[in-house]
Image (cartoon, grey):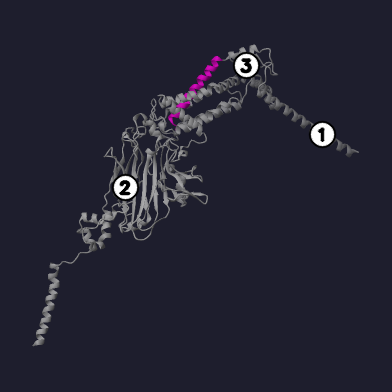
Amino acid sequence: MEQKRLLLFVTLSATVLFGWQLFVMPIIAPPKKPVDQKVAQDADPQDLRMEDAPLVARKPGETEKPATKNPEKEKPDQPVAKQAELLKNPLQKIVLGSLDPETGYFLQLSITTKGAALVDAFLNDPLYRELNDKKLPLKVLNESISGKNITRSLELDVEELNEKLAPLGKNCRTANWKILEQVKDPDHPNIIQSVRLGLMAPDGTIEVQKEFGLKKFPVPPSEFREFRDTDQAGYLVHFEIQLINHSDAVQKLDYRLLGPVGIPLENKDNTRKFRDVRIGFLEDDSLSINTVTMYAPDIIENVDAGKVEKLTAAFQFAGIDIQYFAALLTPDGKNYKPELINGQMTSNYSSSIEPVLISRALNIEAQSRVTIQINSNEIELASGAEETHSYAMYTGPKRESLLGPPLKATEIMDLGIFGPVAKLMLWLLNTLHGFGLSYGFAIIGLTIMVRGSLYPLSRKQAVGAQKMKELQPQIVELKKKYADDREKLGKAQMELFSKNNYNPLAGCLPIFLQLPIFFGLYTALNNAVQLRGTPFLWIDNLAAPDALFKFPFDIPFLGNFFNLLPLVTVGLFVIQQKLFMPPPTDKDQELQHKIMNYMMIFMGFMFYHVPAGLCVYFIASSLWGICERKLLDFQSKRKPVTSETQDSNTIEIKAESKKDRNKEDSNNDQPQKKGWFARLQEIADQAQEQAALKEKAQQQNSRNKGTGKKSKKRR
């Protein structure tokens, strides 16, 4: 009986315990949900922000705020909370600087939290506007969109941080960084001067911060133009990278920094200058710079071949330039200390620098988008340590006054071997413009100054050409007389030239002296950002072809615009040729004339795409030359003179001015002095006669020896 009661007690107890656990306990104390589900469904956003305290920037020595709840319970959930908060960082755009030049800023930048990169940059100077719409400020940097890929300036990659972000499907470029700090202009509270952004690894061990900033430079309105054209600091974007080790272990980090992206390619149908990579390396003395230029087609070829070269020397500047503007990154700050190691300047910031192909142009490879990438040295950080690398990026016009120290990038001006002449031409242009002349009339004034300084040589050339034209009948007679003896013909021509005081080489001297001026002015106008967008008469832009109207079709080698100035320029060249070149007297001269006509057609194609400012110079120069020659013809007096050649029937025509005729009358009884060319001809004749006598003597000796041998044989 007792056993039955014991068995019944055990059975009922088990039933009650089973029913209690199965039905009652779920109601009284529900089981905990999985951690991920709790974070995703039940967590309050405000609580998540509090748990994500390590993402907030902390100054050195500042401790993290304690959590309000039990830290022991929340500690296991902390990394998950950080991941969730990392994905919730908002996508925002922060605008630095202003488009109002009166605020003292030169630039306006847009920074995005996605990748903490620079989206675009505008120049607010009224001198630099969009060519298509001069009401809009010029955008000198812009993001590059190629399919689904978007590339922005100053994007950063930290490989160690990318590995920690990979489980979330993010990296340094695609994750949204957190805005840590914004500094506003005290004089203009709506303008932001600098912004600092941060990105923390999900496990809280690594933090990377980036700061962008502009400086304010208020100047009096009376000095606005001079200040904008000489102050380099106003065009600098200050950029800082800070790496922080929050872990207890030593961290070894390195980064890859992308250079400027999206610099516009203006007037691409006519310009010969596209986006080029420019890197200035420090020489041994840290003062001189060795500038290296890399062109887009060469970069594409190396990329396709997998042979992209990484340059290891310390650089002073690196970036992209186009015809009139440049975006150059340069190391900055007190921490930058390059040193000479094994005969090469080495940077403590970067281990190497390399060109990068962003997007490939479909038709013309030279128009592809390229930039540079800076690869840092390996940075070893102890627990709680941090390291900062500071840079500055010049974003502005290519002026020698703006590219000097501390940037030291004046070599990108591309003034060539005639650089001093080009600088002189630019100085004269700016000086004439400073007197109140527009740049179009300044070019005309420059032409008058150049041709006026060369007037004595031009006059001598014109007199010589006129003499040559008048001596043509005599030369024809000499060619008929000495048709079978070229030696006597040459001697007779030299005697004719000498008696008429004509030097055939003197006409080339003014041409050779004008060549440096021509190339120097061409280089100056191609680099003068002052002429960009400058109107003159019907011309909208002196730095580009005049483009009077557009054709409904494309013409091979010419494009789809009608440019009037190149046609006027070549037309004046043809008129000068017809007026001043002597008519052909034989087949050789006829061939020369045909070649000159073909050259004019070639020059028409060559000049069709040159800047309108250069055409204005050539038109003014041609008109000056025509007027100069007509004035000389008006002043000259002609009189027939009996020829002093062997042919008594040949009449010599000598061109002389009134002043020359009076001088000849006063010195009629004195013997005429021979010129240097006549003396040179006499020396050449004497040398030729001596050579001929020597040759005859050698021939006579050889004949005598031959007759002597024959007589011996007969004996």
Residue 196, disc: 2
Residue 653, disc: 3
Q: Residue pushed farthest right?
A: 715
Q: Mark 2: which secondary structure?
A: strand
Q: Residues within 10 Å of mark 3 (few under 14, many from 20)?
A: many
The residue at which mark 1 appears reads as 701
Q: Nearer the viewer, mark 1 or mark 2?
A: 2
Residue shown at 12% from the left, 73% from the top: 20
Query: Is residue 631 on the magenta stretch?
Result: yes
In which quadrant of the rendered view does residue 99 lie?
Answer: top left
Q: Mark 1: which secondary structure?
A: helix
Q: Main secondary structure of the magenta part?
A: helix
Is 396 or 601 nearer to us in this picture?
396
Q: Are marks 3 and 1 in contact (CB under 8 Å)?
A: no
Q: Quadrant of the C terminus?
A: top right
Magenta segment: 609-635
In this picture, residue 496 sits left or right of residue 369: right
Q: Quadrant of the N terminus?
A: bottom left
Residue 530, disc: none
Q: Could you tell me residue 240's position as x and y percent?
A: 36, 47
Q: Could you tell me residue 422's position as x and y percent?
A: 49, 32
